[in-house]
């Protein structure tokens, strides 16, 4: 089945002015700022990992338009249900930069979402959180709350049973949920062609009788407008939808991966021409007075912000190792108590037996 791809800002920075007339200049600069912040945070994180200052991390380079465009339309009461490659969306919604460094640095406290934010925990289990999103949406509907639950996951998640069960249940029970699939063409080393025999992910929506749309995921305007349209509709009419964002994972799956083992540099070079930040910069330069000086100032400011987050991350007091025993049971069983005491003792001796 052929599915048209929605695009308002092309690779060369030309925009469909009529289609984007309701996006203000202020909003465009905000998008540009957040996309750059995400990239700088990401690149710094990868470099910290190489220096042994972070555990592991998956690169979001290339997916900044998808991340920012999907999160900006959310209202304060909506629920965002992410996978693990949504840093940009999380920062847009208010997660502190240092928290995600803590998380990928192996400090669980970085996974805690501040109370005032409606964001579910990062979900590493591929596809599992789509079920949570449906549950959240159904609960809100039953309580009469006018919200949307917005989940984001990768192309790989569409091969999980959870994906199909979630779409089916959302459709049958008319849950106010929008499923975003960031189709970055890879699930670790599995290419999109091996993931599914359908030409697109969007067309899978037909099997559940919900709307499915395909969007250029490197075009922040198209992502923003489409997600806004379907999020508004889910809130108002309890209609779920599936949105495929067509993008590309420019980096390795994580720092534990080496993508040169399974994909050709020419493929990556092709996608570099579709870079989401470059095309927005060209557009803003040609139509909204963006200049090299403004660019330099912005990058300096954002670099400062990222460096500040690194300093905060590295000055957080080390977690108490006994913490890892504390949160599974209401009452700790005897064998965990024993282990905890042993760990405490070891810790006091500086980790030596
Ligand atoms: C249920 C489950 N199976 C396998 C894994 C190991 N794993 C982690 S990420 C990943 C690939 C995910 O690909 P995709 O959904 O396309 O997301 P992307 O990494 O491209 O953002 C796999 C198989 C896992 N975390 N969970
Ligand atoms: Mg993927």
Image (cartoon, grey):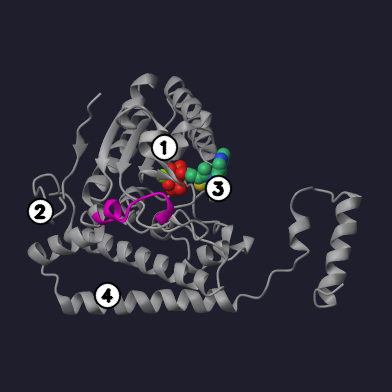
Provide the residue designation for mark 3: 124
In the displayed structure image, the side of residue 323 where residue 136 appears, left or right: left
Question: Which quadrant, please, contains the C terminus?
Answer: bottom right
What residue sits 57% from the left and 61% below the top? 103
Does 69 appear above or below 287? above
Residue depicted at x 17% and y 60% = 25
Residue named by callout 1: 146
- Label 2 – label 3 distance at C-alpha: 37 Å
Image-quarter location of ligand 2: top left
- SS class, disc 1: loop
Alpha carbon of mark 1 to alpha carbon of mark 4: how far? Answer: 37 Å
Closer to us: mark 1 or mark 4? 4
Dot 4 crowding, Cα within 10 Å, few <14, some 14–19, many 20+: some
Q: Residue at x 32, y 63 (%)?
A: 34
The percent position of residue 202, horizontal first and vertical second, equals 32, 31
Q: Which residues are magenta?
A: 260-269
Give the label on residue 298, or none: 4
- Decide: few, some or many residues near mark 3? Use Cα within 10 Å; few <14, some 14-19, many ≥20: few
Q: Secondary structure at mark 4?
A: helix
Tell me: 15 left or right of 193: left
Q: Is residue 255 magenta?
A: no
Separation of disc 3 and disc 1 at Cα? 28 Å
Element on which disc 2 rests:
loop
Q: Earlier along the polypeptide chain: callout 2 or callout 1?
A: 2
Mark closest to the chain's N terminus, 3 or 1 = 3
Q: Nearer the viewer, residue 332 or 197?
A: 197
List x then y, in percent, for residue 14: 10, 53
């Amino acid at each position: 089945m052929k599915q048209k791809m929605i695009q308002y800002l092309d690779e060369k920075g030309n925009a469909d002015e009529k289609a984007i007339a309701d996006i203000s200049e202020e909003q465009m600069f905000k998008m540009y700022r957040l996309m750059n912040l995400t990239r700088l945070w990401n690149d710094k994180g990868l470099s910290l990992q190489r220096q042994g200052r972070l555990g592991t991390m998956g690169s979001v380079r290339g997916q900044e338009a998808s991340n920012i465009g999907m999160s900006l339309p959310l209202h304060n009461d909506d629920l965002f249900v992410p996978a693990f490659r949504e840093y940009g969306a999380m920062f847009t919604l208010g997660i502190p930069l240092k928290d995600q460094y803590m998380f990928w640095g192996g400090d669980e406290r970085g996974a805690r979402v501040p109370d005032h934010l409606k964001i579910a925990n990062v979900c590493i289990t591929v596809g599992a959180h789509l079920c949570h999103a449906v549950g959240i949406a159904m609960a809100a509907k039953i309580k009469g709350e006018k919200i949307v639950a917005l989940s984001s996951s990768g192309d790989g998640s569409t091969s999980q049973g959870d994906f199909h069960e979630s779409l089916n249940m959302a459709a049958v029970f008319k849950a106010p949920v929008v499923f975003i699939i960031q189709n970055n063409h890879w699930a670790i080393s599995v290419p999109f062609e091996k993931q599914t025999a359908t030409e697109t992910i969007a067309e899978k929506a037909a099997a559940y009788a919900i709307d499915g749309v395909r969007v250029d995921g490197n075009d922040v305007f198209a992502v923003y407008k489409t997600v806004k349209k379907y999020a508004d509709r889910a809130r108002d009419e309890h209609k779920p939808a599936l949105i495929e964002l067509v993008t590309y994972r420019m980096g390795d799956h994580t720092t534990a991966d080496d993508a040169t083992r399974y994909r050709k540099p020419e493929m990556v070079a092709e996608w570099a021409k579709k870079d989401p930040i470059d095309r927005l910069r060209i557009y803003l330069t040609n139509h909204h007075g963006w200049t090299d000086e403004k660019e330099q100032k912005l990058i300096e400011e954002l670099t400062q912000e990222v460096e500040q987050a690194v300093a905060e991350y590295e000055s957080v007091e080390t977690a108490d190792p006994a913490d890892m025993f504390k949160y599974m049971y209401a009452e700790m069983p005897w064998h965990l108590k024993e282990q905890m005491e042993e760990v405490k003792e070891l810790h006091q001796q500086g980790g030596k037996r």
